[in-house]
Amino acid sequence: MKDTELTQRKNDHLDIVLHPRQAVGTLRPGFEHWRFEHCALPELNLDDIDLGTHLFGQPLKAPILISSMTGGANRAKDINRHLAEAAQTLGLAMGVGSQRVAIEGEANWGLTSELRRIAPDIPLLANLGAAQIKGERGLDYARRAVDMIEANALIIHLNPLQEALQTGGDRDWRGILTAIERTVAKLEVPVVVKEVGAGLSVSVGRQLAEAGVAMLDVAGAGGTSWAAVEGERASTPQARAIAMAFTDWGIPTSQALHDLRQALPGMPLIASGGVASGIDAAKALCLGAHLVGQAAAVLSSATTSSDAVIEHFQTLIEQLRVACFCTGSADLVALKHATLTQAEAGA
């Protein structure tokens, strides 16, 4: 695919995701079905609650990953700068969007070592699609993606539904698991694997764990629907009809998280996909996530300024802190033991 076509695709994605009604499916992430038991006697100082954690040996001030958003459009340079400045200020982790266009094209869209200079103290995660690591140059691509931004880890994203619905999408997914195993074995940094909004099942999670993947991002259904996005981009009524049939496809985020934690108790998990507030984040952490990721929810702020991104995440962090306070949780370890119950179906 030509560089200009890839860039136009990324621009289309940004335009659609910035208008949420066009990109939302009918599924919910499922956090609304879980409820904390309120603690009326927390015996804590709210300001002393410790939200700190670590990712790949680096400290974080809060368990938040600014999830992969964009890496192939001209405005991505400003977006990535705003996100990196905010991540550095708040002590959060950051994953960049797909680096395919930056590697294959002439423009880097801000995905250079300058990003590391803006955010020298945070975990920074590179990102490539599964189809890119499957090819003959897959390992070279992976190393270039990591070196390009001096990343601490590489995210490999899985998006078979999106590719199946996309004009010119990658349709041959044979050999992807072998490519992931090869990358894990030979890459010098840890490998994270994420879905892009349809969720990771237990069976796939087990395969990835056996392949040596260091961390999984469940990226479940309930946030941006890439089927809806591709439906909006469709060039014919038939293509739109095919895509729109899948807007409620996938595993809701809370279900994917709960099931993977039960099946793979030792695997670090990131919860993303429809995390709308710090209360959702608290529920995800209690359900077994190590980090919580947000992307589309902060995209509008990211197009504005780093201050807007900082304000967005300060709100989420304070919501998370109050949720800890009102469950009697002094830190994230205690939050994992808070009482969280699931409502009866239909209640």
Image (spheres, rainbow, N blue to C red):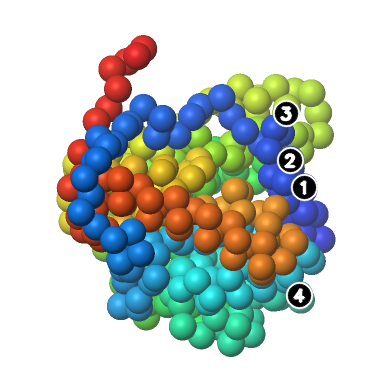
For mark 3, give the secondary structure.
Answer: helix
**Alpha-carbon span between mark 3 and mark 1:** 19 Å
State the SS at label 1.
Answer: helix
Indicate which label's residue lies in the foreground, 2 or 1.
2
Q: Work out which quarter of the rendered image holds the C terminus and state it.
A: top left
For label 4, count other residues whose C-alpha is less than 10 Å away and answer few (under 14), some (14-19) or many (20+): some
Three-letter residue code for mark 2: His
The residue nearer to you, when weighing 332 against 39, is 39
| Numbered label attached to residue 107 | 4
On-image quarter of the N terminus: bottom right
First reached walking from the N terminus: tag 3 or tag 1: 1
Q: Would you place residue 246 above or below residue 168 in this image?
A: above
> Going 59% across and 57% down the picture, which residue do you hit?
312
Q: CA distance from mark 2 to mark 1?
A: 7 Å
Q: Which residue is mark 1?
A: 15
Q: CA–CA distance between discs 4 and 2? A: 26 Å
Q: How many marks?
A: 4
Disc 4 marks a residue whose amino acid type is Ala
Q: Are marks 3 and 1 in contact (CB under 8 Å)?
A: no
